[in-house]
Image: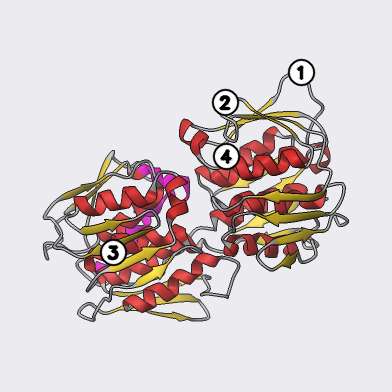
């Protein structure tokens, strides 16, 4: 990956986009698969894995817990083994695990350490991680007998776990702030001493939970019993096992959203190999395809993957959509709203105020910086297009999704002559999930002008 400057000018497309865009593996699936591989009874080989800050933090934490994790970034493969030597005896000092700002790693490792048969584990991240929701999972693990101590404010990192396994039985969890809290509990539930009957408090966004449940089935678990929207039951009498000892990870549907949307900005068509549309894979964020179709893009499934096409001059419609179930993609649409014909309303996003940053307030602020008319409520944004400025600079708040979303907007040829007009602060924050995003974007631009 090339080194990025502190402020990156985005070079607009002057010709329609074309070619193939290979999207890296899913972050959500990579970190889930790493955890489930660690819980298997033998070595597991992962292919198509994402290599980014979040997944590398997860892999390094597993190594500190005694697992063998051998990674080959060039090939996109990870081998997880050494399960029998994991969770070593307590030596007098806690095992220190650092999760940065990785929400998946934070929630999944907390549950894993709580389910460990022995050991003392101290988990922390950067200061911003100490503000992210953990209380629902912490309360549930405590109810299952975990000795879990919050070393600062109760319900938040840093935490210390004195492990002796999970007892199972009935438990309530509030996963309304993040479905990862429930996913973490589900994945370690088969390790409990008795089946787990989980009552849901306050609702949950199901697509990512369903992805977790289906992945658990791939790793040898029976289907989770779901009782409407009120609860689930997880059996505990079957170990994790992957008969083929190999698992292929899908391309990241959220990362794909940027390149699926790019032709709406530049015109042209792109193919995203191996990516499937809604219902064709495990990831709920593929629902964003339907939003792009409503805006005006033509997106088709082909044997090679998803093909996205748009001819400049066609209408680009403003839309009204709830993003509650696929909220990581809402910034992609919001950043493109200045180019649409008419207002765009994005709702169901209140929970994103507690992610890497307050994404609702941050997006409203940056769109206003671009001269847009924005109405912000707790749960929604309504964006009415106004003329874009001749020059602008976008603050990313250290949030990778701001950088990538506005990176796509910057591909719009604002001046009609290819001059950059939009600059992105701290573009390197994309390293969290998509380290080579801007390098790939430039490759696509160069390909568009190649003869």
Relative to 2, does residue 378 appear above or below in the rendering? below
Q: Which residue is mark 2?
A: 152
Task: Give the magenta-colored segment's residue range.
Answer: 428-451
- Of residues 445 and 320, the one nearer the viewer is 320
| Crowd rating for badge 3 (residues with CA inside 10 Å; few <14, some 14–19, many 20+) | many
**In front: label 3 or label 2:** 2
Which mark sits nearer the N-terminus, 4 or 2?
A: 4
Residue 315 percent across, percent down from the top left: 24, 80
Residue 406 percent across, percent down from the top left: 29, 55
Q: CA distance from mark 1 to mark 3?
A: 54 Å
Secondary structure under tag 4 reads helix
Residue 239 percent across, percent down from the top left: 84, 54
Q: CA distance from mark 4 to mark 2?
A: 22 Å
**In front: label 2 or label 1:** 2
Q: CA distance from mark 1 to mark 4?
A: 24 Å
Which mark sits nearer the N-terminus, 1 or 3?
A: 1
Q: CA distance from mark 3 to mark 2?
A: 40 Å
Secondary structure under tag 3 reads helix
Residue 374 percent across, percent down from the top left: 24, 58
**In front: label 4 or label 2:** 2
Mark 4–mark 2 CB contact (< 8 Å): no
The residue at 58%/47% (across/down) is 104
The residue at 37%/59% (across/down) is 380
Which mark sits nearer the N-terminus, 4 or 3?
A: 4
The quadrant where residue 350 appears: bottom left
From this viewpoint, which residue is outermost toward the top? 92
Q: Which residue is mark 3?
A: 336
Q: Which residue is mark 1?
A: 92
The residue at 60%/31% (across/down) is 154
Left or right: residue 248 versus residue 125 is right
């Amino acid at each position: 990956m090339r080194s990025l400057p502190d402020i990156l000018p985005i070079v607009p497309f002057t010709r329609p986009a074309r070619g193939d865009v290979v999207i890296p593996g899913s972050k959500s699936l990579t970190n889930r698969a790493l955890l489930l591989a660690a819980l298997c009874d033998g070595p597991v080989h992962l292919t198509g894995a994402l290599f980014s800050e979040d997944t590398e933090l997860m892999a390094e934490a597993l190594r500190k817990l005694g697992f063998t994790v051998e990674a080959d970034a060039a090939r996109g493969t990870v081998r997880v083994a050494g399960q029998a030597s994991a969770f070593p005896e307590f030596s007098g000092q806690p095992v220190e695990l650092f999760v940065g700002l990785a929400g998946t790693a934070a929630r999944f490792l907390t549950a894993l350490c709580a389910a460990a048969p022995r050991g003392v584990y101290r988990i922390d991240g950067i200061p911003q991680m100490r503000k992210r929701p953990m209380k629902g999972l912490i309360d549930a693990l405590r109810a299952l007998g975990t000795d879990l101590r919050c070393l600062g404010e109760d319900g938040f990192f840093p935490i210390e776990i004195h492990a002796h396994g999970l007892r199972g039985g009935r438990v309530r969890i509030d996963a309304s702030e993040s479905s990862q809290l429930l996913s973490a509990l589900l994945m370690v539930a088969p390790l409990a001493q008795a089946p787990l009957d989980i009552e849901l408090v306050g609702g949950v966004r199901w697509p990512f939970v369903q992805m977790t449940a289906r992945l658990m089935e791939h790793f040898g678990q029976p289907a989770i019993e779901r009782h409407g929207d009120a609860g689930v039951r997880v059996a505990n009498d079957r170990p994790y096992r992957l008969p083929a000892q190999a698992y292929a990870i899908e391309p990241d549907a959220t990362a794909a959203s940027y390149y699926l949307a790019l032709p709406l900005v530049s015109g042209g068509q792109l193919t995203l190999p191996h990516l499937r549309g809604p219902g064709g894979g495990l990831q709920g964020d593929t629902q964003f395809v339907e939003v792009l179709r409503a805006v005006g893009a033509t997106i088709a499934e082909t044997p090679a993957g998803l093909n996205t096409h748009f001819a400049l001059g066609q209408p680009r419609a403003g839309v009204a959509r709830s993003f509650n179930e696929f909220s990581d993609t809402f910034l992609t649409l919001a950043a493109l709203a200045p180019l649409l014909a008419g207002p765009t309303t994005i709702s169901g996003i209140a929970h994103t105020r507690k992610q890497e940053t307050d994404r609702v307030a941050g997006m409203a602020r940056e769109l206003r910086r671009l001269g847009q008319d924005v109405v912000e409520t707790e749960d929604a944004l309504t964006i009415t297009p106004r003329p874009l400025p001749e020059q602008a600079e976008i603050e990313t708040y250290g949030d990778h999704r701001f950088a990538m979303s506005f990176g796509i907007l910057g591909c719009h040829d604002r001046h009609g002559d290819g001059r950059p007009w939009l600059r992105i602060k701290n573009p390197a924050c994309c390293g969290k999930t998509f380290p080579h995003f801007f390098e790939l974007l430039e490759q696509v631009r160069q390909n568009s002008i190649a003869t």
